[in-house]
């Protein structure tokens, strides 16, 4: 029994490092993190030729676009809230003023 254990200790010591590296790489790939080789150099990402910097710039531009869209929608909601809460007579006066202006 002890000879079997003595044989398993070096085998376990040799296989733990590569097994843990393979598991870490699998988890990183599954969750979309960038992959690197054993020297720390970046490997090709899932998105093909796009570099991390390019992906970051694309995400920033999309974020800016969506931020602008949200601000425009907030302005429209404010106008709709003002129309919904204003008295009907003021709204009708403003509509009539617009009609007579033409």
Image: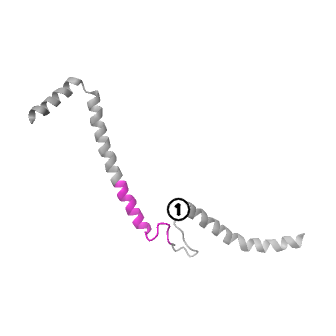
Q: Position of residue 8 (x, y in %)?
A: 81, 71
Q: Which of 16/100 is in front?
A: 100
Q: Main secondary structure of the magenta part?
A: helix
Q: Which of 88/39 is in front?
A: 88
- Asked if residue 75 lies in the magenta stretch, the reply is no
Task: Say if 7 sits above or below 30 in the image.
Answer: below
Which residue is depicted at the point 54% across and 68% down? Answer: 35
Would residue 95 be found to the left or right of residue 25 on screen? left
Q: Position of residue 79 (x, y in %)?
A: 27, 36
Q: Position of residue 42 (x, y in %)?
A: 51, 72
Which residue is depicted at the point 61% across and 65% down? Answer: 24
Would residue 73 be found to the left or right of residue 102 on screen? right
Where the C terminus falls, by quadrant?
top left
Q: Which of 9/21 is in front?
A: 21
Farthest right residue in view: 1
Disc 1 crowd rating (10 Å Cα; few below 14, some 14-19, many 20+) is few
- The quarter of the picture where residue 31 lies is bottom right
Where the N terminus falls, by quadrant?
bottom right
Would residue 73 be found to the left or right of residue 2 on screen? left
Count all numbered tags in the image, as a single digit: 1
- Asked if residue 53 lies in the magenta stretch, the reply is yes
Which residue is depicted at the point 64% across and 65% down? Answer: 23
The magenta segment is: 44-64
Q: Position of residue 74 (x, y in %)?
A: 32, 41
Would residue 6 be found to the left or right of residue 42 on screen? right
Residue designated by label 1: 32
């Amino acid at each position: 029994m002890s000879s079997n254990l003595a044989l398993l200790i070096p085998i376990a010591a040799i296989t733990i490092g590569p097994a843990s590296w393979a598991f870490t790489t699998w988890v990183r790939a599954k969750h979309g993190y960038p992959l690197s080789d054993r020297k720390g150099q970046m490997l090709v990402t899932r998105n093909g030729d796009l570099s991390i910097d390019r992906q970051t710039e694309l995400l920033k531009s999309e974020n800016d676009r969506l931020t602008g869209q949200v601000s425009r929608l907030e302005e429209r909601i404010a106008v709709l809230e003002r129309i919904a809460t204003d008295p009907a007579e003021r709204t009708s006066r403003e509509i009539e003023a617009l009609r007579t202006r033409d």
